[in-house]
Amino acid sequence: MKPGTLYLVGTPIGNLSDIGRRALEVLAEVDLIAAEDTRVSGVWLRTAGIKTPLISFHAHSSPARIEAIVDRLREGQAVAVITDAGMPAVADPGRELVEAAAAAGVPVSAVPGPNAAVTAFALSGFPLPVTLWGFLPARGREREEAVAQLVAGTGTQVFYEAPHRIRRTLEDLAPRLGDRRLVVARELTKVHEEVWRGDIAGALAWLHAHPPRGEFTVVVGPRQAPQAAEPSWDALLARVAEAVAGGMSDREAVRAVAGAVGVSRRELYRRWHRAIVKRPGTATD
């Protein structure tokens, strides 16, 4: 343990067996644990035999509470920050405290742990880059702007949603997402974990048949690139014929035309060979 250090400690998002050995060691050895909800964390901390003093630190904590924690760090105390589930400062309380500690020259260290957004992203099979949104604003202009930015993003998008808002959020997104793929995860790592895959219309039908319970993590797949139009092979063959008439060999002409338009050289040559074989008295080079 390093005196005067702020430790961000990841905690299980469901299954308590996911807590790491180092996380337990740090929580047992620090001078103070700042917990999002001391009642929630207190239960499993006691079960783990950890007796470190707890104070409350959550999204609505005052600047005075942040300054009080920073003062303890300046005095040389080691402080751990935990949330009800997941990694502090990632869509959970902790960012402002990290900012204040860094500004005060206090060392900040992380003990990595589970995170619902990263877990759901890994389960989705969608590619990087990925944007993590946390919870979308519940209403008003901020919500509309966030939804617009999410839809405009071309890469994978991940956001959290509460059970009583998940349907409305997907209904808001439905006319804008088109056929983008979706993964909807709930109760990750818990007994009733579910991971649903499909499009947004299917997701809404699934939610209608299964009343939503537990917090949801939604992963929106990247925007699909438009399908390339089938090339006009007749037009390409005409260009090859023109190049051959100008003195190029068959292979040179095919290579030049295929490279210029970005089609398969092998496929163009196959079609060219088939076309000239059909012409009586014509031979290839």
Image (spheres, rainbow, N blue to C red):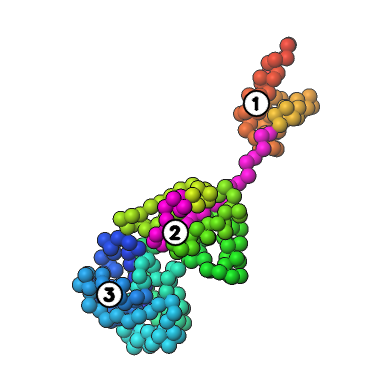
Image coordinates of residue 10 in percent, x first then y, are 35, 67
Determine whether 80 is above or below 223 in the image. Answer: below
Type of secondary structure dominating the magenta stretch: loop
Q: Residue at x 66, y 19 (%)?
A: 274
Residue 71's place in the image compared with 276, above or below, is below
| Magenta range | 206-231
Q: Nearer the viewer, residue 166 or 221?
A: 166
Q: Amino acid at mark 2?
A: Thr
> Which residue is rendered at x = 50% and y = 58% of the image?
167
Sequence-first disc among 1 and 2: 2
Q: Which mark is residue 42?
A: 3
Q: Looking at the picture, how far across and down is residue 143, in whole percent? A: 57, 67
Where residue 22 appears, as percent x and y from the top left, is 27, 67
Residue 217 lies within the magenta run: yes
Disc 3 element: helix
Going by the numbered disc 3, the residue's amino acid type is Gly
- Residue in the foreground of this view, choosing between 153 and 22: 153
Give me the disc on residue 217.
2
